[in-house]
Image (tube, rainbow, N blue to C red):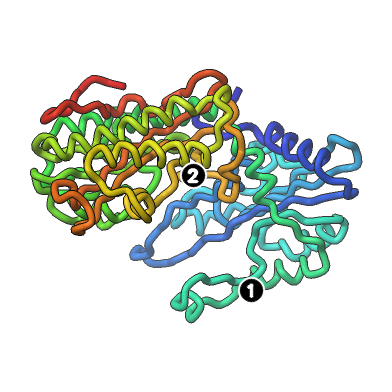
Amino acid sequence: MPNAGQSLPLNSRTMRLQYWLLRKSSIDRELFSTSFTRSQTSSTLQASATEFHQITLLNLTGFNEPEALAVIAKGQGKDEHIFHLYVRPKDPKAEQWEGARSGLEAAADVFNADEIGDINSLTSILSPIISSAASVYTDIPLKASPTTVFSRFFSSPTSRSEGFAQILKSSKVQPLKPLINEIRAFKSSAEVLSMRKAGQVSGRAFTDAMRQEWTLEKDLGNFLEYEFKRRGCDGSAYVPVIAGGEHALSIHYVRNDDILRKENLVLVDAGGEYGNYIADITRTFPPSSRFTKPQADLYNAVLGVQRTCVSLCRASAHMTLDKLHEIAERALKVSLADLGFDMSGNAMEVLFPHHLSHYIGLDVHDTPGYSRKEILKPGHCVTVEPGIYVPNSDRWPKHFRGIGIRIEDSIAVQEDSPYVLTTEAVKEVRVNKLSTSAL
C-alpha cells in the first residue's frame, strides 16, 4: 500500500488502464499519452512562479514536473505494457533559478519508466512510437480552443502544440478522459485515507473559525488558509468563497474583500489539500453574533435535507447523484412552502440553481464528464451540498430576502453507510446559538 499522501503506484494504475482497454477494445495496439507543458525560465528576480500541478500525469506516473510526456504503450503480451517517460534533463544553471529537476536518471530509477528520453528531442523520439500504434488516446489539445472573445483574440498556437498535431495527423486519436475517469472515479483505501486527513484538518479549522468573531471576509479566509497548513495540509484545495450577507447569493463569489456585518450570515466554501487530495466543505454561520429566528429556520430547512441526502450516500441505497438531487429538490420544496415561500413556477430553479453533488478526489470537481447517472458504489467520493439563495425580491417572504445558505460535506460511499470525511466541521444550530457539538 502506498503512503497516505501519494497516488497509487504506477503499475497499479497502468495495469488497471490496460485491463479496461483489453476488455473494451478489439484493436491490436493502443497508445496512451498525457502531458502538460508550463515552464517559464527567467533571468530576473522579478519573475513570478506558479505552482505546477497536472493531475492526470501525476495520477498515472507519480511525476509532477513541467514539460514532461508520459506514454503507456501496449507490448507484445496480453498484459504487457511499456512505460515511456520523457522529461527535462538535469541543468545546473536552470536549477539555480527554478529548483531541482528529477532528470532522466530518476525517470528510470525513481519513477520506474521502461523507456526514458530528453523532452527536447521529442519530435524524433515520438514519431516512430506513434506510427506503430493503431490508436492514440490523449487529451493533449491539438489546437488552441479559446472559449471567450478575449482569449480568441489573443491566443495563438505554440510551435510545440503544432508539432504534436503534425505527428498525430495520420493517427486514430481517441479521447483519454473516459479511460482515466473510470480509474479515478473509484478511490482506493489509501486515497480515502488522504481525503479523510484533508477533511479532518479542514473541518477542525472551520469549527475553530466559527468560535471566533469576524469583521472582514479576508481575515476569515486568511485564518482558514493558515489553519489548513498549520494542522498538516499542503494548503487550500481551491480558491475559497468567503461570502458575507448578499454576496452568498453569488455561487462562486471569490473576491472575499468586503466587511462582515453582525446581522448577516457568512457562507464559507473552502477546504484543504493533503497529498494532492482535497476536502470540500461549506458552512454558513453568523460571523460575530447569533442566528436570528428566520436565519435559523431557513438554515434548519437546508440542514434537514442535507442530512437526509448524506444518509443515502451508500451503495445499498442504489442511488445516483441525479436521484439524490431530485430528492433534495422535493424535500426543499416542501420545507420552503412550510416557511411561507410560494413554490409555484420556477421557484426551485431560482432558489436552488445548482446541482446537489459532484465527484471529488484529486480535484474539487473530479473526473469531469463522469456521469451523475452512475449508481453510487463503494469507492465513489462525492459532495452533498444543498443550498437556498433568496433574492432581494418582493416574490419572497421579506424576512428571508438576501439570505444565502449552503451546507456541504465530503462523503466516501461505503456499502451500507456513508463515510463523512468532513465530520469535524460542526453544523448543528439552536435558535440564537451555534452548537459546538460535532456531527
Mark number, residue 159: 1
Amino acid marked by disc 1? Ser
Residue at x-position 72% and y-position 35%? 16
Residue at x-position 28% and y-position 41%? 337
Instruction: Check disc 1 and report its element: helix, strand or loop.
Output: helix
Along the line of sight, which residue is nearer the eye, 98 or 251? 251
Q: Earlier along the polypeptide chain: callout 1 or callout 2?
A: 1
Residue at x-position 86% and y-position 56%? 134
- 348 to the left or right of 300: right
Q: Relative to 344, does residue 171 appear above or below in the rendering?
A: below
Q: Which percent across, then down, holds residue 292?
A: 11, 37
- Rate crowding at label 2 as few (under 14), some (14 to 19) or many (20 or more) other CA atoms within 10 Å: some
Label 1 – label 2 distance at C-alpha:
29 Å
- 323 to the left or right of 120: left
Q: Which percent across, then down, holds residue 252?
A: 34, 54
Along the line of sight, which residue is nearer the eye, 141 or 241? 241
Q: Quadrant of the N terminus?
A: top right
Residue at x-position 37% and y-position 28%? 307
- 206 to the left or right of 410: left
Along the line of sight, which residue is nearer the eye, 306 or 366? 306
Residue 24 picture quarter: top right
Mark number, residue 363: 2
Q: Which percent across, then down, holds residue 272?
A: 37, 38
Q: Quadrant of the C terminus?
A: top left
Amino acid marked by disc 2? Asp
